[in-house]
Amino acid sequence: MSIALHLSITGRVQGVGFRAFVTAEARARGLRGWVRNRRDGSVEALAIGEPDMVAALVEHCRRGPPAARVEGVEAVPAADDGTPRFSEFPTV
């Protein structure tokens, strides 16, 4: 059984390698989905996979890469959009 969570991460999360960090962590856990920067300075992601692996990714997002300063992570249930693997998408 898989779940999907939509993540919104705020703080100093752009220009610090956050998307690459999330991509590496998600792929290491066999997750599908995507990550992208938002024009408002946040990072947005969709994580799809086994519940314990998605939860582990959320916890890693709360810490972020060394140069990041995460202020908040909002995680809400989402629909599986059918993304075949975990990818980085352009800024929106």
Image (cartoon, grey):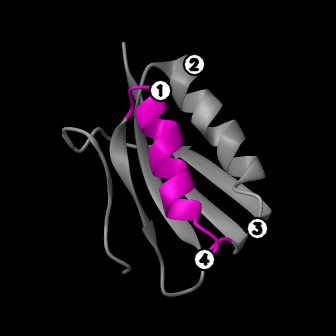
The kind of residue tagged 4 is Gln
Residue assigned mark 4 = 14
Disc 4 secondary structure class: loop
64 relative to 51, above or below? below
Residue drawn 76% across the image and 60% down it = 72
For marks 4 and 3, give the one nearer the viewer. Answer: 3
Residue assigned mark 3 = 67
Label 1 vs label 2: CA separation?
A: 9 Å
Label 4 vs label 2: CA separation?
A: 26 Å
Indicate left or right for 77 with 55 as reference. Answer: left
The kind of residue tagged 3 is Ala
For marks 2 and 3, give the one nearer the viewer. Answer: 3
Residue assigned mark 2 = 52
Which comes sooner in the sequence, label 2 or label 3?
2
The kind of residue tagged 2 is Asp
The picture quadrant where one finds residue 67 is: bottom right
Q: Over which residues does the magenta segment extend?
A: 13-31
Disc 2 secondary structure class: helix
For label 3, the crowd category at 10 Å Cα-Cα, with few meaning under 14, some 14 to 19 and many 20 or more, is: few
Label 1 vs label 3: CA separation?
A: 23 Å
Which comes sooner in the sequence, label 1 or label 3?
1
Disc 3 secondary structure class: loop
